[in-house]
Image (cartoon, grey):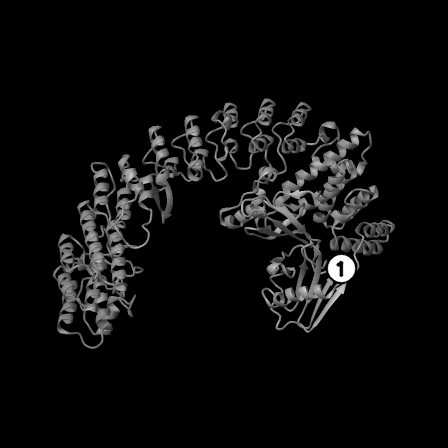
Amino acid sequence: MPRLAPLAVPRHLGAVALALAGLFALSAPPPAAAHDIGAFIEATRLGRYPLREPERRVWGTENVRDVVLVGQVENRLYLYHYLRQGGAGTPSELAFRSRPLVIDPAAWNPAREEDVSVSAPRDGLGFYWVTYTYPDADGRQAHGFLVDESGAVVTVRADATRVVATAEQPWDEARRARALATLKPALAGFPWRLPAFPADVRFETRPPVETTAAFRKLHQAVRAIPRARAADFNRAFAALRRFVLEHDYREIDPQNKDAEMLTALNDYGFWLAEAGEAVEAERVLDEVLRRDPARTPAYLNRADARIKLRDRQREQRDVHATRAQEDYRLYCSRRLAAGEAIPANVAARIGAALGVKALDAAACRPRLVIFEAIRAGDLNAVRAELAQGQDPNGVNEYGVSALSIATHNRQLEMVRALLAAGAKVDGPNRGAPLLASALPQARDTRPAAERYALADTLIAAGASLEALDANGTPLLLRRVSYYAEDRDTLDYLLAKGADPNGREKNGRSVLHAAMSSPSKFWFAEKLLAKGADINAAYIRMYYGRQAMWETPLLEALRESPGGEPKPQVSERVAFALARGADPAVGGYGPKAGQQRAGLDEALSLAARQMSPELVDRLAQAAAGKPRAPLTTAALSSLLRQWNEVENRADAQAKGAQWDDLRARLRATAERLLAAGVPLAYSGNATGESTDQIAPLSLPWLPDDLYQAWLLAGANPSDRSDRGTRLRGVVDADALPLVIMLRLGNDAKARMLLAHDGGLYATPARCGMAVADMLAWSLSDNGPLGPSAARALQQVLDGAAKAPACDLAQGARVKPFVGVSARDLAQRAGVTLAVKAPG
């Protein structure tokens, strides 16, 4: 039986797979990065259907009744068809594995990746069509293979004028018809789009080759040429290599009937390494040693090939170096055991690779044999290795310890044997906490004492419950985040002493994770009972130099309302407040420490939920506690939500639901002001504020509320952020008075003029007000009407009376954005009698 690989992962996942391959290559699929999760899921699903080693899967599809895969090794593809006789969820059986689908060795480049696709025969008729292409292909030639239900292969080459289909078996009329029925739609479809099906169709036959005999003949030809005749040798070797690439080295004397064939394959692997084809050399020598592990010279040859791989594949340098060292040890230990001298030049090469001066029994003792024994589950072999001096803390080629692998494989007695021999529970594990692998899987239904025996053993040996994974996340937090449905394990970890206030690298706590969903509240209660801090904060992000300190309450408030705007308070927020969360904790502040600015952020987030009750609850929870002064951020958040409601009300049919929402928004605004949220920017010389909405910029605000807010302290020279889209407003950052005058909103314009003192409060505000009014007057079509002219004159008169007015300030009104008040006055022919700043 051919040996089958447990899983083949797409080439683009190779670097991800390497990270934990030392663990997963022994018993499970390798993990993938988050951005590759779709490909990883597909690889895991299709990985249940094995390929023959060392093939990797390059294409696959699974449905209820069958599975079709394509494996690849070098330039050879193999089509697999698995049947699922009972449908989904039932065992599968291999219907066929094709003969090799050979990409022309002369055109094949190992550095290029083939894009493979397969079309299955319809209604059981025709052939499978397997094709491949490259990103830089011009599309003028088509390459592919027809595969029948027995696995026989037809090689197809086509261009606009001719199709050539070449097979080993003779053609008859029925087989030709089936081939044409497959080829006509295949060559017209993606990725090949020939303008028309070629008129010249040729069905050719090539005689089958007796692989072993042909390989023997070519090998003998190469071996007979002295190396001094380099050109002749290279020519003969190239012919041998082309033959192997056109066939399959695994099919050369597969039953090991001829001992000379293994010697020939070993020679071929050696020649490949010498020729610089180290990857091919390693594969061939793997096959030699799989068939005959006692073939000592093959270890030396494979070690030399792996040294070349070490020097070429930098991202896997350590893996290749460790494997090469092990092969050197296997070679020299066997030579020493047989009493055979090691040639001086070979000994020097091995000594340099191993970093030793003398090749004695200790230096040549293999280091990775114990890992093979662990993989095989051979406890006696592991004990024997340890008794003979094997280092219990040694690592494999991936930097993973024997204890880590035994733990991952859930081999309790193996773990005990390693611990008894001195294995360290904090040894290398490439980022995966040892204890994480010891916890029972969800499908484990044994009694608790048995399920947790492995974890108990490691904890008793000193395994840390707080060990961090590669992302800096402690075990309990990771389990809460991704495996919260396993309540027994969460209870187990907490009972064993896991820190209820544990944090990951960025500072996010276990309680944050436990309060992230109502389904986890049961565990949040247990954490709180164990002393978890309900107000734990971490830096979620930076805004300029300010850090956003995030508590579980703020994280809950940040949960975005979905769908149409509607009042809502999440279960998470209610849970946090009911357990004593302090809204004043967290918020924006310096990285070095918090300033208790959380209420400002909490009210800003609560405003989105249009809940006056929630605003009151937050204010009450923070009452009497020290906190930073509130800003206009919460009111801006509410006004942004209100602006969205007005936009949607315009776009959709008007109805009572919009009036209900407006009432909720207004009530929420009243509660924000009652909580101490200001109407005006504080300590602001210009009236501009990033990401804020000035309430008096809103033409759709009810007039009575507009008037009330003016009387309550809203500043008529505060401006909205220029990037804000306000319903009905062209220039959001323009002076509110200009916005109302442009829209002909006389009522609001009169209100603003009646409270115009704020326009001149600072030199900058004064200059900006003058600039905007002049820009508006110049941009208005025709002469100003009486009321507009009076408004302009009132502002100019107010500026003249101001203590100082900075005419260098530019306008925010199109098309004069950035033009100074002084320049605009000249264009308008207006003389400004104002006091300059300073």
Q: Is residue 201 left or right of residue 21?
A: right
Q: Secondary structure at mark 1?
A: loop
Residue 825 occupies quadrant: bottom left
Q: Which residue is painted at 19% across and 65% down in the image? A: 740
Task: Compare residues 258 and 456 and report the one nearer the observer.
Answer: 258
Residue 817 occupies quadrant: bottom left
Counting from the top left corner in percent of width and height, residue 302 is at 73, 42
Q: Is residue 386 left or right of residue 289?
A: left
Quadrant of the frame with the N terminus: top right
Q: Is residue 561 above or below residue 383?
A: below
Quadrant of the frame with the C terminus: bottom left
Q: Is residue 783 above or below residue 714?
A: below
Task: Compare residues 190 and 615 and report the one nearer the observer.
Answer: 190
Q: Which residue is painted at 66% across and 38% down in the image? A: 322
Q: Is residue 815 left or right of residue 473?
A: left
Task: Compare residues 466 and 286 and report the one nearer the observer.
Answer: 286
Q: Residues within 10 Å of mark 1 (few under 14, many from 20)?
A: some
- Answer yes or no: is residue 214 visible: yes
Counting from the top left corner in percent of width and height, residue 381 is at 67, 27
Residue 787 occupies quadrant: bottom left
- Answer yes or no: is residue 837 visible: no
Number of marks present in the image shown: 1
Q: Is residue 103 left or right of residue 218?
A: left
Counting from the top left corner in percent of width and height, residue 180 is at 67, 67
Q: Is residue 194 above or below residue 78?
A: below
Counting from the top left corner in percent of width and height, residue 128 is at 64, 59
Q: Which residue is mark 1?
A: 169
List the single residue furthest toward the bottom: 782
> What amino acid type is highlighted by mark number 1?
Gln
